[in-house]
Amino acid sequence: METPLLAFNDKGIYCAAADVYLDPWKPVDKAIISHGHADHSRYGHKKYITHHSNVPIISHRLGEINVTGKKWNESFTINGVKFSLHPAGHIIGSSQIRVEYKGEVWVFTGDYKTEDDGVAVPYEPVKCHTFITECTFGLPAFKWTPQEQVFTEINNWWAQNQADGRTSVLFGYSLGKAQRLLKHLDPSIGKIYTHGAIENMTEVLRSQIDFHETTRVTRETTKEELKGNIVLAPGSAHGSTWIRKMVPYVTASASGWMTFRGARRRRAIDKGFVLSDHCDWQGLLSSIKETGCEKVICTHGYTDIFSKYLREHGYDARTEETQYESETGQLESDKEKDSE
C-alpha cells in the first residue's frame, strides 16, 4: 500500500518523505507550525519552522526555542519535499502549509477563516489534490454576519452601558480574538482597559499592527476609573476575584458559539456577539471548492456531519482524529492566561 504524503499518527501529522511534522501535539525533532495557539504550537520540539510574523508569538509563549521564520509563498525543501506557507486569515501569523512531492500537492489549513478581519493577512485559496480542513463550525446553522455590523453592535453596547453608568467587560481569547476586538473598538467612547494576559500578548504584536491605546488593569486600578469604560479579558476571568472590582459591570462574549443562546446561558454571559476566527459553513464549502481538490480530510469540529455532506457532493472525504481544539476549548479553558 502506497504511503500517503501526509499521515496521522500518535504525535501529529507526519510527512515521512521529509521526516517532518505539521503542528505535532507531542515533542518531535522538526515541526512546521501553522499558528500560535497552544493546541497547534506546543513546547518541546527540537526545531520549529513557521511564518516570520508568528515567531515573536511562539517565542513569547514557549520561551527559548530553535525557530526559523519564513515569508509567505517562500518555498523551502526538506529531503526533496517542497513546503511553503500561505495566509490562513485565522489570527496574526496563521498559515496554511502547502506540501508538494513528486507532483502531488496537499494543503493543511491549521485553523482558518475567509473574512478579512483587518488584523491577520487575509486567507488565500491554494490549489491542491488533498485538503486537510478544520470544521469547527461545520453545520449550516453557522452563518456569520459581516463583521462591520457586529462591531457596530459592540460599540453601541459599550456606549449604552456607559450611559447606564456600568463597566463593559468583553471576553475573548487572549491571542487573536482580543486583538481583533481591540482593532475595531471605538476609542472615542471611552478608555480601553485590558487584562494582563491580553495586554502581554498585545504588546508583543504592536510591532506588527497599529492598535488603539490600552491600559492594563492592575491591583491599583479602581472601579471608579473603570466605570463607563470597556475591559477586554480572557474567558477565564469570568467569575474570578479579578472581575469584582468592575462592579457594576455588564459582560459579553465574542464567539461563533454565541450563535446558540444556550452557550451564552451556560457561561452566565449577559450578551453574546457572534464573531469567530474560523470559517462558517459557507466559508468552509467555498474554500474547499476553490482549491480544486478531490480529497478532503476533516480534522476537528463537526467532522462526521461535514465529511458526510462532502461525500454526498462528490468529494472523497474522511475524518482524522487530532488533539486540536475548537474555539469552544479556547474560550472555556483559556489555558494560556498566564503566558499571554
Image: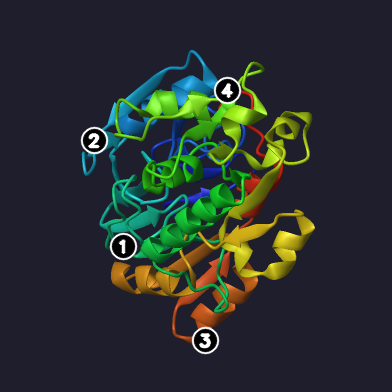
Which badge, 1 or 4, is on the more N-terminal residue? 4
Residue 231: x %, y % from top left = 56, 38
Q: Which mark is residue 128?
A: 1
Residue type for callout 2 = Lys
Residue 172 as seen in the image, left or right of residue 149: right
**Mark pair 1, 2: CA separation:** 20 Å
Residue visible at 61% across and 19% down in the picture: 218
**Mark pair 2, 4: CA separation:** 24 Å
Closer to viewer: mark 2 or mark 4: 2
* CA neighbours of label 4 inside 10 A, class few (<14), some (14 to 19), many (20+): some
In the image, residue 48 sits, relative to residue 267, either above or below, namely above
Residue type for callout 4 = Gly
**Mark pair 3, 2: CA separation:** 38 Å
Q: In the rendered image, which residue does mark 2 sit on?
A: 71
Residue 145 seen in the current view: yes
Residue 24 seen in the current view: no
Residue type for callout 3 = Glu
Residue type for callout 1 = Cys
Compare residues 90 and 274 and report the one nearer the observer. Answer: 274
In the image, residue 40 sits, relative to residue 4, either above or below, namely above
Where is residue 105, by image quadrant? bottom left
Q: In the rendered image, which residue does mark 4 sit on?
A: 44
In the image, residue 308 sits, relative to residue 121, either above or below, namely below
